[in-house]
Amino acid sequence: MTEAAVAGFLTGLSLIAAIGAQNAFVLRQGLRREHVLAVVLVCALSDAVLITLGVAGFARLASLAPWITSAMLYGGAAFLFAYGALRFRAAWRGGAALMPAAGQGAGLARTLATCLVLTWANPHVYLDTVVLLGAISAQYAPQAAAFGAAAALASLTFFSALGFGARLLQPLFASPKAWIVLEVVIGATMWAIALGLLRQA
């Protein structure tokens, strides 16, 4: 069981730590100190659900209904293009408007809605959690549950560190220019991921 748990934690951490839409959003919320706990919990719980589905063998659905993959690819790309455009527009408006001290920021409901879409409409999340972790967990049967639980713990650990650790970068983002750069980087990341999805479609 220990071997399966260690493998699950390290595998989950290596997959989740890759730069993606979820991570960029969590980082941004952490820097702005807006609804960080709620965002971290939504991301971690969503991953836990998807990892559980993968370990339980739900990944076979894609082979039974191939159209689901294409639908996720096109839908995810469309959303990422739109969200990236919003980040570019925010950067165009100027860094002062992006700093946490300016305005009240987005409400909790809107923030969580965006977080949920970035998580559940992103095919890469399914590939990492449901497909890859699900397939790897089969190698550790009958301890697949320990593998999945450890992978879910890795998700919670990473998102907590990213969201709450972002405040350590706060001095760097005291300048409006730094926020402009951040928004441009996030927008470019979203568009790059979207283009990658379209190439797979």
Image (cartoon, rainbow, N blue to C red):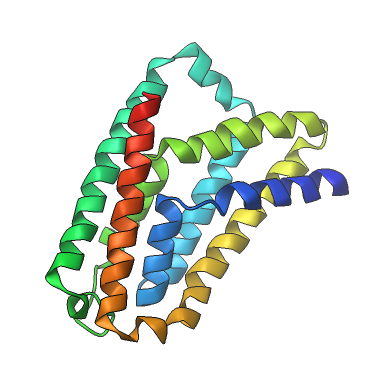
Residue plotted at (59% across, 46% down) = 15
Nearer-the-camera pick, 92 or 108: 92
Image quadrant containing the C terminus: top left
**Residue 65 drawn at (x, y percent):** 44, 14
Nearer-the-camera pick, 62 or 73: 73
Instruction: Locate residue 109 relative to residue 4 in the image: left or right.
Output: left
Residue plotted at (54% across, 47% down) = 47
Q: Residue furthest left?
A: 93
Q: Residue furthest right?
A: 2
Task: Give the tally of numbered discs.
Answer: 0
**Residue 96 drawn at (x, y percent):** 19, 80
**Residue 39 drawn at (x, y percent):** 42, 62
Residue 180 visible in rendering: yes
Instruction: Locate residue 92 relative to residue 127 in the image: left or right.
Output: left
Residue plotted at (33% across, 30% down) = 198
**Residue 121 drawn at (x, y percent):** 36, 39
Instruction: Locate residue 200 relative to residue 145 in the image: left or right.
Output: left
Residue plotted at (53% across, 75% down) = 165
179, above or below 19, in the image? below
Residue 1 visible in rendering: no
168, above or below 153, in the image? below
Image quadrant containing the N terminus: top right
Which corner quadrant of the image does residue 71 belong to?
top left
Nearer-the-camera pick, 22 or 113: 22
97, above or below 189, in the image? below
Nearer-the-camera pick, 10 or 111: 10
